[in-house]
Image (cartoon, rainbow, N blue to C red):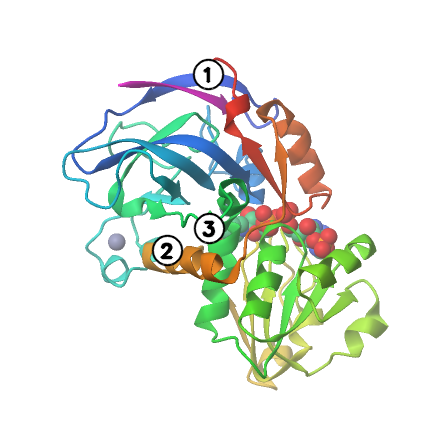
């Protein structure tokens, strides 16, 4: 067993603090990563604070992991010691269902998430990336192209793929008008990808202070969603809207902006339901309201390679791990530019 140092939540209310535990030994198909950087996702806050009612403690959050391969098992062909590699939100799945066979492991009925998920290897829960090392089957480990800055690449593993996948699925491209709602970790990646795919991009924000940043990140136009006249100016004009907001809000104000046959995809997972949208907003223009969960392994690799080719990474604030509780409070106040990433060299006892 591998003694592992970490930061953990011990309950829903206390600050995260030091923790240690054992990782499994490296099996024939396993890759052991020394973790260099781990991004901080709003999901970490939802789960640490038990906002979805499914948290098990102690919990080691973190699913935007970039590290250096320390060891590989004897049957590992994809990686060797010294390689830069990454782990996202999934560390295993059933591998045989139609979803797994299609490379859509995130939709498997038996996925193993990187943390707060029953771990078939240990019989306990999985522990995530706020730790110095992790052991993962090679099938769930991604290659990180050398051209990507490893710290700024970490958020690609969740914020990146969660926005890339629906934009690809809904075939966003040139000639389309696309809205991104919320300029946080997911939203800022959504703006970058929608722009890179050739769409006209409009960013919706509740924070007037983010307008200039949104334009720098690639938005052609920025709308303050709390100003009804600015919203009304865009009625019936969007092909697609990607909504990343982490809190319950009025969906009708966005549905009304879609053209006939337009779609809005929700990726934010608030702790309370959104008020139900009016059916009329869907049926009169045959609009669609959908959702999307992260992305499968093949598409996650495709996204990382796309980012290397197009020079796309996340805009990050690098923090020491003892600033994590403060980072959570800032994230809840929408005060993050635009993703916190933990420098794992700052982990104590390590
Ligand atoms: P984040 O960095 O905190 O960004 C969320 C943004 O939403 C905020 O920066 C803010 O942007 C906007 N916002 C927050 N509260 C709002 C409110 N009351 N009304 C309107 N807008 C509000 O969070 P994130 O890491 O991007 O995650 C966003 C959500 O996606 C979370 O619920 C997370 O759990 C979920 N998520 C889902 C998946 C998936 O696979 N579907 C994957 C990862 C995360 P402005 O300041 O611009 O308004
Ligand atoms: Zn995430
Ligand atoms: Zn499966």
Left or right of 270? Residue 57 is left
Q: Residue at x 56, y 32 (%)?
A: 342
Instruction: Please provide the residue range marked out in magenta.
Output: 1-9
SS for dot 1: loop
Mark 2 vs 3, N-terminal side: 3
Magenta span: predominant SS is strand
Residue 140: within the magenta? no
Mark carried by residue 301: 2
Residue to which mark 1 is pinned: 350
Residue to which mark 3 is pinned: 147
Looking at the image, can residue 187 be seen?
yes
In the rendered image, the vertical position of residue 132 relative to residue 165, given as above or below:
above
Q: Nearer the viewer's eye, disc 3 or disc 1?
A: 3
Q: Residue at x 36, y 45 (%)?
A: 90
Q: Residue at x 19, y 55 (%)?
A: 96
Quadrant location of the N terminus in the rendered image: top left
SS for dot 2: helix
Q: Residues within 10 Å of mark 3 (few under 14, many from 20)?
A: few
């Amino acid at each position: 067993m591998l003694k592992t140092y970490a930061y953990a939540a011990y309950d829903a209310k206390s600050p995260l603090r030091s923790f240690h535990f054992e990782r499994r030994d490296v099996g024939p198909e396993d890759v052991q990563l020394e973790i260099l950087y781990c991004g901080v996702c709003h999901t970490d806050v939802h789960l640490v604070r038990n906002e979805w009612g499914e948290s098990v403690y102690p919990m080691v959050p973190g699913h935007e992991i970039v590290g250096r391969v320390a060891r590989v098992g004897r049957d590992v062909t994809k990686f060797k010691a010294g390689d830069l590699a990454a782990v996202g939100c999934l560390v295993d799945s059933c591998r045989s269902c139609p979803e797994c066979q299609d490379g859509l492991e995130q939709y498997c009925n038996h996925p193993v998430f990187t943390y707060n998920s029953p771990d078939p290897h240990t019989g306990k829960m999985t522990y995530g990336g706020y730790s110095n090392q992790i052991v993962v089957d090679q099938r769930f480990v991604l290659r990180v192209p050398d051209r990507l800055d490893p710290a700024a690449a970490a958020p690609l593993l969740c914020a990146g793929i969660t926005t890339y996948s629906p934009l690809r699925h809904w075939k966003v491209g040139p000639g389309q008008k696309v809205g991104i709602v919320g300029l946080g970790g997911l939203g800022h990646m959504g703006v970058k990808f929608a722009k890179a795919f050739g769409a006209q991009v409009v960013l919706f924000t509740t924070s007037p202070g983010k307008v200039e940043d949104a334009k720098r990140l690639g938005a052609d136009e920025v709308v303050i969603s709390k100003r009804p006249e600015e919203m009304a100016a865009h009625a019936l004009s969007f092909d697609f809207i990607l909504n990343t907001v982490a809190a319950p809000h009025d969906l009708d104000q966005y549905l009304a902006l879609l053209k006939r046959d337009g779609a809005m995809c929700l990726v934010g997972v608030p702790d309370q339901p959104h008020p139900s949208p009016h059916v009329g907003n869907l049926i009169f223009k045959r609009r669609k309201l959908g959702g999307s969960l992260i992305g499968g392994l093949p598409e996650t690799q495709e996204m990382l390679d796309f980012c290397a080719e197009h020079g796309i990474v996340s805009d990050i604030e690098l923090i020491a791990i003892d600033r994590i509780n403060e980072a959570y409070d800032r994230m809840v106040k929408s005060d993050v530019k635009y993703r916190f990433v933990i420098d794992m060299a700052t982990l104590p006892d390590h």
